[in-house]
Image (cartoon, grey):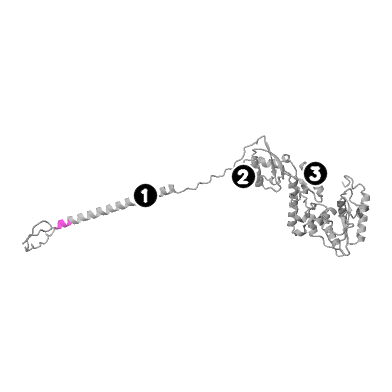
Amino acid sequence: MTDQWDLFGEVEQQNQAPAPLQPPPTPSRRAMRQAAQAAAKAKKRRGVSRSVATVVIIALVVVIGGLVLTIARSMAPTEAEPAPTQMVDFPGPGLDQTVLVDIATGASGEAMAVELAAKGVVATAEAFVTAFRANTRAGQIQPGTYRLQLQLPAADAVAALLDPDNRESQGLVIMEGLRAAQVYERIAEALNLPLAEVEAAAADLDAIGLPAEAEGDIEGWLFPATYNITSQSTPTNLMREMVIKTKSTLTDLNVPQNQWRETLVMASLVEKEVRRDQDRPLAARVILNRLAHEPAMRLQFDSTVHYGANDYSSVFTTDEQRADESNLYNTYVHYGLPPGAISNPGTKAIEAVLNPADNPEEGQWIFFNAVDLCTGETEFNVDETGHAESVAKMQAWIAENPDWAAEGGCG
């Protein structure tokens, strides 16, 4: 028979019966006790090892996590924190050098601050605004051109603007009822310019912004007010400001644009015919009543005759002047309103035209006549009898005050 090798390299005999299995020897009680103790110690050692390993792993996770977070923070973009704003103010007392500063009409403390900082008078606009708010008199600063030192402390700059001695110019005052020619004279005087230069500027209607409703006539559109004169003032921009003021006033009073011209014409008559505020609505009612009267009535105002004749030597007119048909402003011969305004009316005269007085129960206001030429006291009447009485009062007053028209005659 052929020999076969087993896996262990030992030769086994074929067909040889295996040796019977022997049961393992039974361990003694001592051996079993020792084996149990050894197993318990081994288990305890394995538990400790696992706990230590767990703590080590957790610690590593914390360390690694912190490291990762630190790296992430260092790599993340950071926003720059804004530096706190620090107010800068000049320590004073200021330089010997000066500069001209324009304070516009109605300028706020903030607007002044910007101008002063730009000119180098104060260090910062913030410093001036703080000083402006701290000064209880700051609201009394007047518009105009001021000559101020450079590099002033903000509080000193406020005080300098309150000092009228630092003003280079005063405002241009245009009173109610002045004619355009009189306004030109005041502009020329304020700007120290030849009158012809101002008149030439007035002729450029587009430059001064005269609206189409004026129909090319500047009279009535130079609004009476106080205007700021600065180093940049010119006849053109001053008159443009006056025209803008007229348009804004009419708009604010809700006058329809197609009625602007007629309203100004009637208001100019009210402005020249009466002087007291309480008489303006009554005069406006007389104008409206005469224009609507049947049969037709002429206005018969001396003020319109004077304007057309360019003669202001007297408050009264002559028979010759009242008969002059060539004078288109002669309301003694021509019906209706004159062809244009005869003065530059103010707000109160315009308001009177928009809100004329009511007629009394006994009739319509048709006549009015001054009975005191110094105070402007005027009487209004509904008929010729009452008007004749008022005229008699005026004549008696003139007899008692023969020098009223002379300089200082009304005190």
Query: Of the residues shown, which amino acid type is indicated by label 3?
Result: Ala
Which tag, 3 or 2, sits closer to the chain's start?
A: 2
328 horizontally vs 250: left or right: right
Q: Mark 2 near mark 1, Cβ–Cβ under 8 Å?
A: no
- Quadrant of res 46: bottom left
84 horizontally vs 182: left or right: left
Does any portion of residue 269 appear in the rendered image? yes
Q: Name the residue at the left extreme.
A: 1
For the image shown, how many numbered marks are present on the structure?
Answer: 3
Counting from the top left corner in percent of width and height, residue 169 is at 74, 42
Query: Of the residues shown, which amino acid type is indicated by label 1?
Result: Ile
Kindly identify which residue carries mark 2. 126
Number of residues whose C-alpha sits closer than 10 Å to that of mark 1, classed few (under 14), some (14–19) or many (20 or more):
few
Q: Magenta segment, principal secondary structure?
A: helix
298 horizontally vs 128: left or right: right
Q: How far is mark 2 from mark 1, CA to CA?
A: 51 Å
Kindly identify which residue carries mark 3. 196
Helix, strand or loop for disc 3: helix
The region drawn magenta spans 28-33
- Quadrant of res 277: bottom right
| 7 and 384: which is toward the camera | 7
Kindly identify which residue carries mark 1. 64
Does any portion of residue 255 appear in the rendered image? no
Which tag, 2 or 1, sits closer to the chain's start?
A: 1
Counting from the top left corner in percent of width and height, residue 36 is at 19, 57
Q: How far is mark 1 from mark 3, CA to CA?
A: 91 Å
Q: How far is mark 3 from mark 2, CA to CA?
A: 45 Å
